[in-house]
Amino acid sequence: MYRSAHLDSFARDNLPPADQWPDLVPSPDTQYPERLNATVELLDRNVERGFDERIALRTDATTLTYAQLLERVNRIARVMRERMGLVPGNRVLLRGTNNPMMAACLLATIKAGLVAVPTMPLLRAKDLAPIVAKARVSAVLCDLSLRDEIDALRRETPSLAQAMFFNGSGQPDAIETHLPAMPADFAACDTAQDDVALIAFTSGTTGTPKGTMHFHRDIVAMCDLFPRHVLRPRPDDIFCGTPPLAFTFGLGGMLCFALRVGASVLLIERGTPESLLTAIQRHRATIVFTAPTFYRQMAPLVSRFDLSSLKKSVSAGEALPDATRQLWKDATGIEMTDGIGSTEMIHIFISSPPDQVRRGAIGKVVPGYQARIVDDQMNELAPGTVGKLAVKGPTGCRYLADERQRQYVKQGWNLPGDTFSMDADGYFYYQARSDDMIVSGGYNIAGPEVEAALMLHEAVAECGVIGVPDEERGHIVKAFVVLKPGYSDDAAMVAALQGFVKQAIAPYKYPRAIEFRESLPRTETGKLQRFRLRAG
């Protein structure tokens, strides 16, 4: 490890022991100098390249050029270091929707050598308390609209001593009140490439969130792997989408990927399928990032909008059913770029560009990464065999003081917890989360496969599949189904859906139990929370 710039050494002190780290495999795309500051690479470099008057961030109401964004970031960094008295290595909780001040605060935190701890906007004080405690957070920058939960949190957490609020002014604790008095320049903290810049907490699809620690080099590396080899953005691209900046999928797609190439990001605070389509049309966006649920809901609305500017669409965050991929392609003519990544790995590591898509597969391993299918003893399995996905590359899992590190990393490989198969050409086919495999009557059944079959039925709007205990079969497949308007949730519909699945996939995989719901539990990023379905 290199000489750290952190005066507060908490993050480095709480990295996993070296023998529990994954192998970090060097890539020609990720060779960085010893001293590296991620914000400098993503923002300052564009001004140095002469991109100062290009638009970096945009909303319906405003735009910020690269020069304006750099000035704002510098002033915010000075507020944190000079007004708040924070020192390199301190952890800063960041709270906000996708808006320019949230993006600027995140970049400023990293530039100042502080450790950003971004959190989802909808989390309540009770959800934030364990994050603050685990990351030993002492300061918070929060959107004024989310102040109530921070005030409640601070009443119960005396250690959260410093708080300032953005998108407001006139009050002593409003960041904007102090910005005019701050010089427009700021010397970036001389961070090492392996100083921790970000602690990203997992989204909680399987229960208790975990803090994943990422270095300055990891933030830059995520921009130099999947985007460079699969997405291939250009400076004239306009990115848009729905994933929150607090989610690493959103941090990449809604900020860092665009900045890395001098492109522009359209930030949308509270998107709906219709408002996202409106935004694409109005701003002539070229690349969209969102989850399969949104694509499924947008497809029927596409004919009402001019989407001629849109060239690329990226899906991640949960499994993409083939029915959704084809629905979107039929509506727009765009072949979806599917991808699988993880908060632990920071972003996508398996994907393929549109011209290399293979039906039913997520794609091939992104250049720079290695992937294989293994059994429980970490033995590599033959092509076509279902097993656990193992990945390694320039990024990898480093949990913040968490015993689960031993489960995620084995023999130098990251184990994201997904069941896959790989064909002889290196294409990876998603089966299920490893804990979502259902063993029924001796058969292994992947819940997402049953979900994909159900989604082909004209009556089904959403569905989730789990295994439930059964005395005779060990477990049976149970489906939770949200019907489209106009369809009846009666015994005839149950029989119709069961018969439909039997015709679509192997008959033994059909859902022996079906429960109709008004909605399904999802995380703020749109992932289905199957553990809540199991809890009843």
Image (cartoon, rainbow, N blue to C red):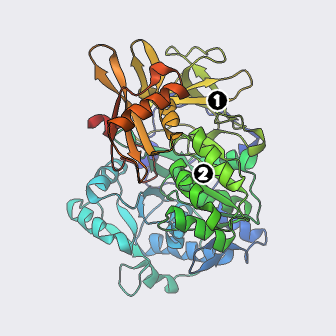
Where residue 360 appears, as percent x and y from the top left, is 64, 33
Q: Residues within 10 Å of mark 2 (few under 14, many from 20)?
A: many
Q: Is residue 202 above or below residue 287?
A: above
Viewer-closest of 288 and 470? 470
Q: Is residue 433 above or below residue 444?
A: below
Q: Residues within 10 Å of mark 1 (few under 14, many from 20)?
A: many
**Amino acid on which the number 1 mark rests in the picture:** Phe
Q: Is residue 342 above or below residue 116?
A: above
Question: Is residue 320 found left or right of 233 in the rendered image?
Answer: left
Q: CA distance from mark 2 to mark 1?
A: 25 Å
Looking at marks 2 and 1 on the same chain, the residue that comes earlier in the sequence is marked by 2
Whether residue 366 appears in this view of the structure is yes
Viewer-closest of 449 and 93? 449
Residue for badge 2: 219
In this view, which residue lies farthest toward the front?
Answer: 492
Residue for badge 1: 428
Q: Quadrant of the C terminus?
A: top left
